[in-house]
Image (cartoon, grey):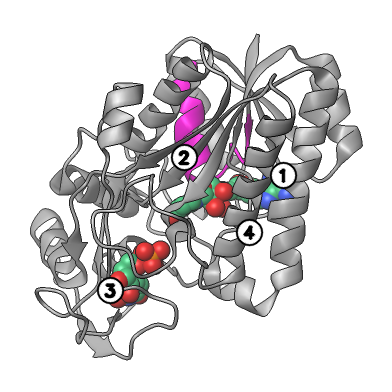
């Protein structure tokens, strides 16, 4: 039996594939390479000493999915494929809903037709919306996400909840990620954003390596200790370990389960800059800019449920997250195109 990883050539997916191969799983990757390079999987192969099966294809392509499930005996699907740029989703909502929502529907239809019912979905803390007291736990109601990207995640969650209610074969994990950062400790695979990074840590890393001049800090007048936004950053290797734990638990439970994947600790933008400077020995130039639309002041997880039900918790601290980011960035200043 093999594990299907959709979006397995991307940032989180490639780290997942490596972890799965190292844990002895057979892996099939389906990725349309819309936001990734196959170089990530070549490096995964070098690190793991074995390769996943790679299929260049799209989750919206039912024929491709049917052929994949007919050819490979799949036990679990880890569904990372999706578009993830908040700004792009505001400009191109149809493309985002089509890719993320319609793509997930097609994937589920093909899974049901093939009799594959174990699914782990990459959701996001953005589904909680604004206005909750911190830390955020899974019992809180979902809110109204501030943009089509976040909304697409909530829509897929809703569909999966309905699906599991209607058909008791399904075992589904909704994993709500907080802020994944970092890279594999080898520095061979990592996050390689297209164009100007939207996210804080890749942007800081590109300033530190000299690829960009100055970081804009989006607002310093939030009601937080230093006025800048606070987030729960989680090492990508901890995040993928959380998926392994969820896969294991799904083998003995039906229905839908929702787990936060975060550390339970928040850091401000200024704390992140300072910590990165310490780890890298580089100066990170920044200027304070206006708030970014749709940003919340603070967001961090209550990770208790995952600890209790998955036996999982994040093990890696901020220094390790940023040291691993820096190792990857230094060795690959232009990402996979180096
Ligand atoms: P990524 O862009 O690096 O990876 C996504 C992968 O999916 C890419 O390789 C892309 O080529 C592929 N893909 C996109 N649409 C596809 C389609 N229609 N068919 C096949 N492949 C397709 O992103 P990531 O950071 O690795 O994120 C993985 C998942 O986790 C996404 O669903 C994302 O929304 C979710 N997530 C990410 C974060 C984050 O901060 N990185 C936070 C919360 C949730
Ligand atoms: N941020 C920033 N400058 C940037 C990118 C992000 O000040 O160039 C801030 C942002 O306002 C937020 C934090 O860094 O407070 C994390 O932002 P990111 O986009 O990485 O994650 P998300 O908004 O999804 O939590």
SS of the residue under disc 3: loop
Query: What's the distance in space between the residues labelled 3 and 2, CA to CA?
Result: 22 Å
SS of the residue under disc 4: helix
Dot 3 and dot 1 residues touching (CB under 8 Å): no
Identify which residue is drawn at 76% across, 37% down: 107
Query: What's the distance in space between the residues labelled 3 and 1, CA to CA?
Result: 31 Å
Q: Which residues are magenta?
A: 5-21
Q: Is residue 106 left or right of residue 304?
A: right
Residue 325 is situated, as x and y percent measured from the top left of the image, at 29, 50
User: Can you tell me whether the CB of the residue at mark 2 lies under 8 Å from the nearest atom of ligand 1?
Assistant: no
Q: Which residue is mark 1?
A: 104
User: Can you tell me whether the CB of the residue at mark 1 lies under 8 Å from the nearest atom of ligand 1?
Assistant: no
Q: Relative to the observer, which residue lies in front, 310 or 10?
A: 310
Label 4: few (<14), some (14–19) or many (≥20) C-alpha neighbours in 10 Å: many
Identify which residue is drawn at 51% across, 47% down: 123
Number of callouts = 4
Residue 278 is situated, as x and y percent measured from the top left of the image, at 8, 59
The tag on residue 175 is 2
Q: Earlier in the sequence, mark 1 or mark 4?
A: 1
Label 1: few (<14), some (14–19) or many (≥20) C-alpha neighbours in 10 Å: many
Quadrant in the picture for residue 97: bottom right
Q: Is residue 314 left or right of residue 66?
A: left
Q: Can you tell me which quadrant of the image ligand 2 is in?
A: bottom left
Q: Earlier in the sequence, mark 3 or mark 2?
A: 2
Quadrant in the picture for residue 141: bottom left
Q: Relative to the observer, which residue lies in front, 178 or 172?
A: 172
Query: What's the distance in space between the residues labelled 2 and 1, CA to CA?
Result: 15 Å
Can residue 16 be found in the magenta stretch? yes
Label 2: few (<14), some (14–19) or many (≥20) C-alpha neighbours in 10 Å: many
Q: Which residue is mark 4?
A: 152
Q: Which residue is mark 3?
A: 297
């Amino acid at each position: 039996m093999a594990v299907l990883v959709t979006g397995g050539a991307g940032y989180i997916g490639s780290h997942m594939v490596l972890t799965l191969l190292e844990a002895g799983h057979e892996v099939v990757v389906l990725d349309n390479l819309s936001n990734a390079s196959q170089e990530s999987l070549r490096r995964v192969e070098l690190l793991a000493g074995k390769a996943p099966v790679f299929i260049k294809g799209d989750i919206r392509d039912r024929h491709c999915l049917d052929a994949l499930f007919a050819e490979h005996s799949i036990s679990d699907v880890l569904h990372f494929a999706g578009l993830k740029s908040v700004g792009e989703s505001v400009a191109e909502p149809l493309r985002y809903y089509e890719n993320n929502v319609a793509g997930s529907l097609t994937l589920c239809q093909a899974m049901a037709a093939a009799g594959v019912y174990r699914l782990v979905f990459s959701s996001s803390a953005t589904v909680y919306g604004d206005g909750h007291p911190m830390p955020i736990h899974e019992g809180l109601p979902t809110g109204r996400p501030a943009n089509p990207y976040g909304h697409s995640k909530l829509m897929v969650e809703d569909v999966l909840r309905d699906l599991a209610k209607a058909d008791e074969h399904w075992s589904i994990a909704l994993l709500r990620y907080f802020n994944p950062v970092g890279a594999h400790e080898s520095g061979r695979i990592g996050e390689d954003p297209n164009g100007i990074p939207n996210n804080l840590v890749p942007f800081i890393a590109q300033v530190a390596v000299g690829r960009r001049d100055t970081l804009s800090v989006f607002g310093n007048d939030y009601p937080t200790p230093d006025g800048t936004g606070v987030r729960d950053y989680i090492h990508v290797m901890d995040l993928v370990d959380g998926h392994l734990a969820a896969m294991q638990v799904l083998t003995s439970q039906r229905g839908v389960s929702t787990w936060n994947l975060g550390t339970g600790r928040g850091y401000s933008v200024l704390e992140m800059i300072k910590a990165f400077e310490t780890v890298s020995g580089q100066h990170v130039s920044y200027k304070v800019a206006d708030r970014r639309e749709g940003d919340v002041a603070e967001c961090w997880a209550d990770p208790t449920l995952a600890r209790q039900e998955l036996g999982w918790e994040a093990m890696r601290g901020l220094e390790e997250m940023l040291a691993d980011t820096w190792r990857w960035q230094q060795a690959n200043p232009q990402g996979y195109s180096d």
